Image (cartoon, coloured by chain):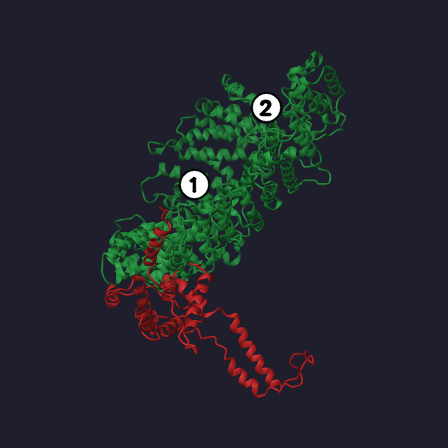
Chain colours: A red, B green
Amino acid sequence: MLQFGNTMSHHEGVNPTNVDGSDSELMAHARSESSWPQSRIELLHWFRQQAPSVADAYRGAVKLLEDVAFPGRLHFIAHAVRDISDRLVFILDPQQAPSRVHYESHLDKIARDWPMGDGFCQSGGPPVVETYPIPVKVARRIDVLVGEHRLRRSRPSAHKILFEILARAEAPGADVNERIVKAFQDVREWFMDRAHLRTDGVPAVDEAELRRQFEAFENILHSFVGSFFTGTKELDAILQSANARAS
Amino acid sequence: MQSFKAPTPEQVDEAVPLFSTRQREAYFFDRLENPYWIGPLAARSLFATAPSVETVEGGGTRHPKWAASSYLARMAKLAPEEVLAVLLKIKTENASVIDDMLVAAIEMAPTLAKKLVPQICQAVDRDSLWYGVGNATKLCVHLATGMENETAFQLAGTLFSSHRMPSGNDRASAAGYEYLEGLQTVASALLALDAKRFCRLLVSSLNTSIERREYTDSATGRDYSFVWRPTIEEHEENHDFEFASRLVGVATRCLEQGIGSGFATLAEILQILDEQKFSLFKRLSLHLIDEFAQTDPDIARKAIMNRSLLDQSELKHEYARMVGQQWDILDSSDQQTWLEWVDAGPTATKGVAGEYDKNDIDRAEWWKFERFHWIRDHLPTNERQFYLGMRAKHGEPPLADLCARITSSWGHESPIHREELESLPFAEVVRVVDAFIGAGDRDDITAVAAVFGDYVRVRAVECSAEAAILKGSVAACVSAFIGKMAIAVTAGELIDVGSVLALCKWLIYEGPAKRRESDESQGQIDGQPWQEVRNEVIGFVGAVCKADSDEQPRYDVATYRTTLWELVTSALHDSATSNVIRSTEDDPQLQDYLIFGINSPRGRAVDAALDYARWLGRQIGDANAKSLAAGFDGMPEVREFLDRQIAPENRTFEALSVIGARIGLIEWLDVNWLSSNAERLFDLREYDRSPSTACGWAAWNSFLVWVNPRIELYRLFKSQFEYAVEQSSRVTIQDTDYSQPMFRLGEHLVVLYGRGELNLDGHGLFSRFIAVTNPDIRRHAIAFVGISIERESDLPAPLIQRLMLLWESYWKSSGPSDAAAKPHAYLFGQWFSSGALPKDWSIERLEEFVSVVPMPSPENEVVPRLAKICETDIARSVAILQKIVDGDKDGWRIYLWRDSAREILESALKTSGPPRDAAKKLIDRLGRRGYLEFGSLLAN
């Protein structure tokens, strides 16, 4: 169930908790996903508590990851990751309306009254006039479009807002690490590129790369929402290897 | 570096997403020891963005540590080029990161480290260096040692620029300390690298520091350095309170080191100094010439034989020292010439600064005397004769080689020493001291009087018998004598009180008529003749009245009553003006006037009168009775004195403050008088008519501050308490000192409530107080309960019940808003930590409290107490702990009580269900905030 208040603007009232729930719930999950690493179990549990609508999508993506033979799995996994990446912030904070500018809708309205341009520009050559009159109502519609566009550009990205929300569990005054936002966006882009069906056939899947990208997606989120000490155990393993002296 | 393995791209790709939060990142970097990870991590932007500088609530900034830069600093020795490449790209104002850069630079070869100098200089110019100054100077030395001339001096120039220098008058600031320590650190290396260039840097610093001093005349070069730095060399006369003076010391040592080590010649340094305009540099030159005279005798000779220097007062010390120490390098002809100059006398006109002119001594002769003093061990016969004659007459010239003495101490050395008086009879001692004081200046008077007082103190008994000798003595002598007699009485010595009182009486009643006019100026205080003597007389009276023997008054009424009262009466008309200056703008409702009272002549007299009354009362009545049976009928003079002091035409803040502080005594003396006169005494409502003359508040506030709460007094002064409570709702509290009278009003009422003598029934005065008083006053009253019950383990049950009721009532009404308005106030925190109240009740109230104030002060006492009793209600205890952890906005307060937090979490983990889950969640939060040690609880 969603646990956030919805009376405050921006995301002031949102305070996502980290992995919660009783041991028995976690044990129940663990039995059904018995081969999952602890961090994955914790991430799923968090989705179930904080964003139940994406929990199954995530779980499905994980299952498809393991089922190499499932047809079209890359498409489905990519969609799941892209949607979770893009929608999670709006699920955690319903106050965050998608800041989409409906360019086509605006341009349709502008196009209706746009003067047929045959006098102010010759293709390939310089403009024959410095200014060109257009109807006021057209100018107003352009003004609205430009205003929405500017507003969209001035707002932080949805991904940055997502990490602002997630960072609240960190130490007071913790700022959002732009590197993390960029890394998350890069992962999202990788899956975005593979989410849509193509005219030239299914893209080749580098299985190792797919897993690496998926685990990156998981680990970035887990860093914020999973148990801190689960993550440090994983880091300990990496450190042990990194600090080992060459024989 | 070869012993580690380079990571594969896959290993790095696997690792990086795991430390997406700052704490995980810090965890990783704090433990990574492999330099091969630098490149791959840099490629993934791990070093791109340092933590920003944070603004702290209440003012100031915080510069968070960055584990990534600390890692680079550790790796600098192993992989300097890789580290350098990364550091050059980091743009930050964060002082912690810049300090890591400095540490890294020091580990690298100077040829690499120098590339960081521009960045570091920018940080210094932006004041982003802070505690990294020490490392910056070490880097400077590192570069200099590595012969990186330009960058070493570039960095030195920035570190010791005028921008970083405190003002010349600066006294002991951290900035000044760092600056000077830094100079001393870099001196050896920079002198070896390029001594003349470093000398110019020192000269530039000195010039700036002098120009920043007040009273420096840049046009003429007069810097008055002979005042703020009397000697160039280290000397007891140099009191290095000022930065400019300390800088002179450091610069001098550096220059001496440069010349002494052969990095520069004396002539080269002198050339640089001669280019400067301030007189300090001329003095510095003379000093160096003197120090290195054996190496360069010709320069020394020329300086000594420069006639113009003989008269320049600003250069006097260094020139005199040089002449005295280097006389032997002059040949006989030069010596003769110099002596002839001295014989010819000063060429300067009258009023040469720094010349000591005493009475009718011929100025020229004195000038000659001082100059001969410089070379006293080398004087030829005639000059020696003159010198010795002057010396026999005047002693050693105190300012022979100085322009001024600034040695200070808490007193002035007495020209008469106690040992000189030891063998003399008392009468002779008095005569000697009188004579000296009569002719001395003020400093001498104080010093001699102190010596005389010491003499009297060790012979108090015998001297007291001869007190009459002091009739006609100067005031300072008499003051000292009577003051020591009072001390002797207090110490229990059986002095001849009668003789001393007789002297006092003579001084007060007959002395003024018999004093010579010239005596009137002695002992003046604020123009009041002999006021200090009168003060000492009153002090002596007080001491006699307070003296006990076997818990009984030592001095009997029959013998001393009349005299004591005569002396007291004489002072009751003295001025009420206090030695302690008070503002007439202050709200009298908020002042404790007793400090002014006891420092005024009238106030002292009132105090002595009350001491007299107590002394009398103990002898004419039953000291153990609740009240004297006869009251003031047995001492009508005291009643008359009190009536007079509280009469409208005689009221003063000072006198009434003393009376207010002794209310308890007056109650014992005559409760009926007090009851009948309470309104006259206090008259608090005068404030509504004329605040500036509402003297009664002085008595009221002294009563509140200095008299313990008692229900009897509350009943006597009920209408005053009622009025004061109403006024307490209208005041604005600026001074939150614990003894603020309005705070004490609350304490009185709380104590009486605690004893069951007042109620919280909604109608009574205590309820009214809680409801209406100023929030600061109310907060203090509530906090006072916590302080009072702290460490009380066995409070009576009725008291506990009343306190619990008080808190519950308070929290239902104004408590939450009081707490939210001042979250750092000690409200429930000490109630809880006292341990005096029931555990379950305490935990429940604490939970309510932290929902409003997440960090209950003092949390370093609250959390340990919570740990002790958490098993009473573990679920609530964990919930409270979580609130407190989340309430730590500073980020470090948890450190103070982490052991107690651990105990609570350990207890919770032993349970099952929600408390255990909550504990695990809290452990996670603590881990995210850097408290990794809590992770072991999960492992266990």
- Disc on the earlier residue, 1 or 2: 2
Q: Is residue A10 visible?
A: yes
User: Distance from label 1 to label 2 (Cα)?
Assistant: 38 Å
Q: Please name the residue shown 35% across and 43% down the image.
A: B628
Indicate the position of residue B629 as horizontal and vertical percent values.
34, 43
In this view, the residue farthest toward the top is B381
Indicate the position of residue B138 as horizontal and vertical percent values.
52, 40
Amino acid type of the residue tagged 2 in the rendering: Phe
According to the picture, the residue beneath numbered tag 2 turns out to be B436
B64 left or right of A16 in image: right
According to the picture, the residue beneath numbered tag 1 turns out to be B610
Q: Are marks 1 and 2 in contact (CB under 8 Å)?
A: no
Asked which secondary structure carries label 2, the reply is helix
Amino acid type of the residue tagged 1 in the rendering: Leu
Indicate the position of residue B23 as horizontal and vertical percent values.
39, 56
State the residue in front, B642 or B393.
B393
Q: Are marks 1 and 2 on the same chain?
A: yes
How many dots with numbers? Answer: 2
Q: Please name the residue shown 64% across and 34% down the image.
A: B227
Which image quadrant for residue B220? Answer: top right
Query: Badge 2 local density, few (<14 within 10 Å), some, or many (20+)?
Result: some
B79 left or right of A38 in image: right
